[in-house]
Image (cartoon, rainbow, N blue to C red):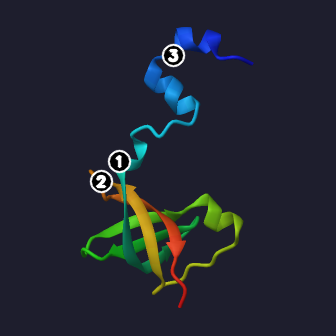
């Protein structure tokens, strides 16, 4: 299917996002290291970040699909909005 009909409906930014353009979404998030201090139901965690903040985090889909276990005391990498650190997503569990 060609994109002739879509070009007339969507703006250039929206079309770039559909076609796999880089967009500006990556700059909205930052990755921060932290330590799991509490395990919550439904793959949720309370994570203390390196800067001292404690945020509620949940497991990313890739970690769920690969059955990665996360326990209290694990060192993890979380991804959260740069403007709001109230919630985050656990994207990596460090080994060891």
| Residues packed near mark 3 inside 10 Å, few (<14), some (14 to 19) or many (20 plus) | few
Q: Secondary structure at mark 3?
A: loop
**In the figure, residue 36 lies in which quadrant?**
bottom left
Q: Nearer the viewer, residue 28 or 51?
A: 28
Callout count? 3
Which residue in the protein does label 3 denote?
Answer: 10
64 in relation to 37, above or below? above
Which numbered dot is residue 8?
Answer: none
| Percent x, y of residue 31 | 39, 64
Q: Residue at x 33, y 58 (%)?
A: 86
Q: Secondary structure at mark 2?
A: loop
| Percent x, y of residue 75 | 45, 82
Distance between the alpha carbons at the discs numbered 3 and 1: 23 Å
| Percent x, y of residue 71 | 54, 83
Q: Secondary structure at mark 1?
A: helix
Q: Residue at x 47, y 71 (%)?
A: 45
Q: Residue at x 41, y 72 (%)?
A: 46
In the rendered structure, are the residues bearing label 1 and label 2 in contact, judged by CB atoms less than 8 Å apart?
Answer: yes
Instruction: Report the residue that reaches farthest toward the right.
Output: 1
Position of the N terminus, as image quadrant, is: top right
Lower sequence index among marks 1 and 2: 1
| Residues packed near mark 2 inside 10 Å, few (<14), some (14 to 19) or many (20 plus) | few
In the rendered structure, are the residues bearing label 2 and label 3 in contact, judged by CB atoms less than 8 Å apart?
Answer: no
| Percent x, y of residue 14 | 48, 25
**In the figure, residue 56 lies in which quadrant?**
bottom left
Q: Nearer the viewer, residue 93 or 25?
A: 25
Which residue in the protein does label 1 denote?
Answer: 28
Which numbered dot is residue 82?
Answer: 2
Lower sequence index among marks 2 and 3: 3
**In the figure, residue 38 lies in which quadrant?**
bottom left
């Amino acid at each position: 299917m060609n994109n002739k009909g879509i070009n007339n409906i969507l703006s250039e930014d929206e079309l770039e996002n559909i076609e796999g353009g880089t967009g500006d979404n990556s700059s909205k998030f930052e990755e921060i290291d932290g330590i799991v201090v509490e395990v919550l139901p439904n793959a949720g965690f309370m994570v203390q970040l390196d800067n001292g903040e404690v945020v509620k985090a949940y497991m990313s889909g890739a970690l769920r699909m690969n059955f990665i276990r996360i326990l209290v005391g694990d060192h993890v990498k979380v991804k959260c909005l740069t403007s709001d650190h109230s919630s985050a997503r656990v994207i990596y569990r460090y080994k060891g």
